[in-house]
Each structure stands twice: as C-alpha cells, then as structure tokens.
C-alpha cells in the first residue's frame, strides 16, 4: 500500500516556548488594532445611527443640533496631507539620494543621525515653529502663488485681489498650504529614512555593471538605484502620507478651523479630523462625543486603507532582492 | 539665411582611432593599496591588441585588483589607492584630462557574478550602455545592434523570441552571456573578464569560452581565471601572479601561454601550472 506518511518533528521545549511568545506578540498587536476599531465603532454608533449617510456629506459640525458630518474636515485632512506629500517627497528623495550616493562617509554618518533626530522631534515643536516663525516667513510666497498661479482655482483666493499692493496678507495665514508645508517638513525625515535604507541596499554588482558600461553616477542611479528602490520610495511616501493624515497638534496650532469645504489651499481657514477632535473634545456633550468618535473612526479607516495600499505595493516591488536567484 | 560651407566651423580632427577596434593595453609599474595594505607591487604587463591575455594565480594574489585597475573600477572602493600608468593605445587612462566614463566605456568589464539589470528586458539590457553613455540610435539600428551583440555573445538563438522578457529571468549562464552582449554594445576596445565562468556550469562555461575565442581579434580580452585548463584553452598569452607570504602581489612570469604551460622558466610557475599548490 502506498500512502503518504504523517510527518512529525518534535520542536522541543525552547522552540515551543519561543513560538508561543512570538505568536502571542503577533496576536496582541492584531487584538489591540481590533479593539481600537471596535471601541471607536461602539462609541460612534449613536452618532452614526442618527446621521446615517448625511455624516459623509454634511460640512457643518453642530452635533447637538443634529447637523454634523465629516465632508469639510475630511477634505481638509486630505488636502493638508497632499500638500505635505508634495513638499516632503521631493525633499526626502533628494536628501536620501545625497546621503546614500553622494555624501562622503563622514558627512553621511552625520546626516543620517541628523535626519533620524529630526524624525524624533515632537510634532508640537514643528507646530510652534510653524506658528511663530514659518507662517510669517512664507506669507510673501503664498501671496506670490496666489498672484501668479491663482488662475488655477485651488491656488486662488476668494474675495481679495492679490495684485492690489494694499490688500491684507491675513487672508493667506492659517491656511491648508502653511499647515501642509509644516506637516511636510515633519514627515520628510521619516520618508527620507525609509528611502535611504532601500537605496543603500541596491546591489553592488549591478552598480558596478552600470559603471563598467561608462555610466556617470547619475546614470548609474537612474538605471540601478531608482528601479531597485521603487518599492521603498512608494512605501516611504505612503508611510509619510499616513502620518500626515493623522497629524494633530502641528495642524491644530496653525489652522483656523472652518466647517466648509475649502478648496482654496492658499486661503486662510481649513480643518482636519484630528484637530477637530482636539478642539471639540473638552466641551463635547455625550452625543457630541459620540460624533467625534465617529469622525475618529472615519480617519482610522482612511489611514488603514492608506497603510494597506502602501504595504501591498511595497511587497510587490523587488526592493531587497538582488539579480541573482 | 542658410549656412554656406564657409560658415561652418570644421570639427577638430579626432586623434583616437575609431571605437570598436582592438587596442593594446599596457600597465606600467602599477602598484595598489587598500588603506595601508599594499596588494600589488610595480606590475608591468603589455596586453597585445586583439589577443586574449589570461591572468592566473592563487587567490589573494592581486589579479582581480589588477584587472579592476585596468578600467578604473579600483577607485570605487573608498580606501583604495594606486600608482603607475595604464595606457590604452598609448594614452594614459588615468591622465587628468581623460574622462573616467570614457575610459570605462572603451574598456568594458564582465564580472564574476552575472549582473544584468533585472528589471529591464533582455533587449533593454543590451542597449543599456547606449542610454548610459548618451548614444542615440534609431529603432532599426538598435534592433540590428541587439541582434549583432547577442549573436556575438552566443545568446541570440536562445533569446530571439523573448527579447521583451526580463533579463533576470534567464539562467545563470545566459545572464552571463547577456552581460557580455551588454558590454559589447558600447563597442569597447578592450574587454576585461573577472572569472566569468566561476559561477557557471560546464556547458555554459564552454559557450562563454567559445564566445571569448570569437571575440579575440575584434577586442583585446583580458581574463582572470582560477582554472588553469581554461587559461590554456582560451588565452594566447598568460601572466602568472603570486603574492608570497606577507608581500604584495606581482607577476612571476608572463609570456606565450603554450610556452608557460609546457616549459615555464620559474619553478614557482611550474609548481602552479602543474597543480602542486594554489
């Protein structure tokens, strides 16, 4: 008779203990994640049940009057994150390429620690810096953009003529643009770190192959380092996007909240989910609290989607795999 | 206004011969260091145009370092230093006015481990050097070049139907021949090979050796090998490197391959080629 044998290998006690600990750790992470989601859903339910689909389309935030929704705050959140990514990705990419490909070893070590240190600076510090220094410094640029690129609606301002030299500059303060740039500076070091890490793993054999064909350094980077690092570039960007979506305090300090969809990124007034929660949490009635939980749940879901997208893209690229099989 | 012939400024005459023609490579008192450690001591060797020169010797005798000095790959290692001159067709490739990329373009290299660009197709791998050195060709010229180089490398018949597939999907031996084709596409005058068969099976090795023999005449080939039989099979001339205990490497003996294998002048060469050490 020909049947397959049952295979059994005794893992031994240490192996079994280690497996238990590892499995427990992995399970715990998943459990915490589900608990957070479940808790948010449980607490948010009264508000969601009352608002139903209008929760996604209402711009105002007056929960006690029954008139509330995340349309304005979610759009604000996404716009701030987009501005942040537009600022952060080129900055991080150039920084990472310089550190991994051009810097001399001494400078490289210093820059790596400086960038990692920047990633560790609390966001409130970025927020204060943005509020007290950067906002004043960037206003002329914001005005310039509104003046010369204002024909593109999102970059225009409403109600003010930017070409009038006597017009006030307060219309450019506390905007999506400024909050986005500050958040961009905040997430750039993290993106830079991820990108530098994958760039430095580009296989030496392929680098030499490109050089041996007579490539310049930039030619080698284009042929070997960038294709190899594609997954890391996308993954780092998504990681930064996730952080930018959830950023609370830096945004809260800079923006002046409005509860209408504000497409004009240069113009004063915007809002974000997390800053809304921070702003209204103290004064909220029990039902208002439930509404805030619902907003939190929406942000939780959006960040989850972004992160899942990031990890699936990063997993499909070949970063980390050399040409030899 | 149209330009009349008298308006145009004639280009200065090009003094170097046309690319793609084999050139003599000559090393003059080449020494090399990694940090404070001297690995090569005043090595001089002439590698005649259109011939295959094999560099043989035991591990750690500096033959790979010497090979990498011949196309300026040595300086990619941060602590590396060197002395001496390398003359390609009589001109020093380390001269300050010579461009680094130009030297590497004229002196191609095939490495020990096949290193095709894995994300690129077979076709793109062959044309990668053109893109990297800023050579623009029409579609037809490119197709022709790809076929020519792959044929030269003995790979055309195997990949003609899958030119659009990624280069990383080929077998090891095919990848190495793809790397040879890639090097040939920029019309080098010298081709350096650093143990090109050490990662390959015997069949692929034979194909690569056939390729090397066919290339001789069109390019000058310099090959580092651990395999004495391979050196005997493919090379016209041979140089035996040796680094004795604690001393930097150098050439013990060089000359016509057949003479070196049958009638070596130095007893150490005799011991090595007869497999008594190394």
Image: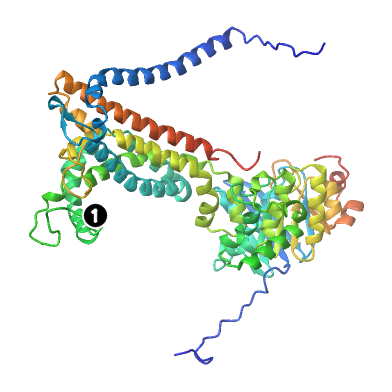
Name the residue: 27% across, 42% down.
A80
Residue A50 seen in this snapshot: yes
Q: Nearer the viewer, residue A101 or B277?
A: A101
Task: Locate residue B76, reporting x and y percent.
Answer: 57, 51
Describe the colour scheme in one phrase.
rainbow
Q: Nearer the viewer, residue B15 or B10?
A: B10
Q: Work out which quarter of the rendered image holds the C terminus of chain B and state it.
A: top right
Left-right relation of A322 to A287: right
Q: Is residue B71 above or below residue B206?
A: below
Residue holding disc 1: A153
Residue at mark 1: chain: A
Q: Nearer the viewer, residue A216 or A63?
A: A63
Left-right relation of A285 to A187: left
Q: Is residue B54 above or below residue A92?
A: below
Q: Work out which quarter of the rendered image holds the N terminus of chain B and state it.
A: bottom left
Task: Locate residue A30, reporting x and y percent.
Answer: 42, 19
Q: In terms of image quadrants, where is residue B138?
A: bottom right
Task: Locate residue A223, reporting x and y percent.
Answer: 55, 53
Name the residue: 30% across, 36% down.
A245
Task: Locate residue B147, reporting x and y percent.
Answer: 71, 61
Left-right relation of A132 to A301: left
């Amino acid at each position: 008779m020909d049947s397959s044998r049952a295979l059994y290998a005794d893992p031994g006690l240490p192996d079994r203990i280690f497996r238990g600990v590892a499995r427990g750790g992995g399970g715990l992470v998943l459990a915490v994640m589900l608990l957070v989601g479940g808790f948010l859903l449980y607490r948010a339910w009264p508000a969601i049940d009352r608002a139903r689909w209008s929760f996604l389309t209402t711009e105002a935030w007056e929960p006690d009057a029954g008139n509330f929704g995340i349309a304005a705050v979610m759009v604000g959140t996404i716009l701030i994150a987009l501005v942040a990514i537009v600022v952060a990705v080129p900055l991080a990419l150039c920084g990472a390429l310089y550190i991994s490909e051009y810097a001399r070893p001494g400078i490289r070590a210093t820059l790596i620690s400086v960038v990692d240190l920047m990633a560790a600076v609390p966001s409130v510090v970025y927020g204060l810096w943005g509020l007290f220094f950067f906002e004043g410094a960037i206003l002329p640029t914001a005005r310039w953009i509104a003046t010369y690129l204002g024909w593109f609606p999102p970059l225009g301002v409403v109600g003010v003529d930017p070409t009038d030299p006597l017009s006030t500059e307060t219309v450019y303060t506390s905007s999506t643009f400024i909050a986005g740039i500050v958040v961009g500076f905040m997430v750039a070091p993290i993106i830079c770190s991820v990108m530098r890490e994958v760039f430095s793993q580009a296989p030496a054999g392929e680098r030499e192959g490109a050089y041996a064909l007579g490539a310049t350094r930039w030619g080698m980077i284009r042929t070997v380092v960038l294709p190899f690092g594609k997954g890391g570039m996308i993954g780092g960007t998504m990681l930064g996007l996730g952080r930018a979506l959830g950023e609370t305090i830096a945004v809260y300090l800079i923006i002046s909240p409005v509860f209408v969809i504000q497409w004009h990124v240069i113009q004063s007034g915007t809002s974000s989910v997390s800053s809304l929660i921070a702003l209204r949490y103290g004064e909220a009635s029990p039902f208002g609290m439930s509404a805030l939980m619902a907003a939190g749940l929406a942000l939780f879901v959006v960040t989850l989607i972004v992160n899942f997208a990031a990890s699936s893209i990063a997993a499909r690229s070949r970063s980390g795999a050399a040409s030899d099989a | 206004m149209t330009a009349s012939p008298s308006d145009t400024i004639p280009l200065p005459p090009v003094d170097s011969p046309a690319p793609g023609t084999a050139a003599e490579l000559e090393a003059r008192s080449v020494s090399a260091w990694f940090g404070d450690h001297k690995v090569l001591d005043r090595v001089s060797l002439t590698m005649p145009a259109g011939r295959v020169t094999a560099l043989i010797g035991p591990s750690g005798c500096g033959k790979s370092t010497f090979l990498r000095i011949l196309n300026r790959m040595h300086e990619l290692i941060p602590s590396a230093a060197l002395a001496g001159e390398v003359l390609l067709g009589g001109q020093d490739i380390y001269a300050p006015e010579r461009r680094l990329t130009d030297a590497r373009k004229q002196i191609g290299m095939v490495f020990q481990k096949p290193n095709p660009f894995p994300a690129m197709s077979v076709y793109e791998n062959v044309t990668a050097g053109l893109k990297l050195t800023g050579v623009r060709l029409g579609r037809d010229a490119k197709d022709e070049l790809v076929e020519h180089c792959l044929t030269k490398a003995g790979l055309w018949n195997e990949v003609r139907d899958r030119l659009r597939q990624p280069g990383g999907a080929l077998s090891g031996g095919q990848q190495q021949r793809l790397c040879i084709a890639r090097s040939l596409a920029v019309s080098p005058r010298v081709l350096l090979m650093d143990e090109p068969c050490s990662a390959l099976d015997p069949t692929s090795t034979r194909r690569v050796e056939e390729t090397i023999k066919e290339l001789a005449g069109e390019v000058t080939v310099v090959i580092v090998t651990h395999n004495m039989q391979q050196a005997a099979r493919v090379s016209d001339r041979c140089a035996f490197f040796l680094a004795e205990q604690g001393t930097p490497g150098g050439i013990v003996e060089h000359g016509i391959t057949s003479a070196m294998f049958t009638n070596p002048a130095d007893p150490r060469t005799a011991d090595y080629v007869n497999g008594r050490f190394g």
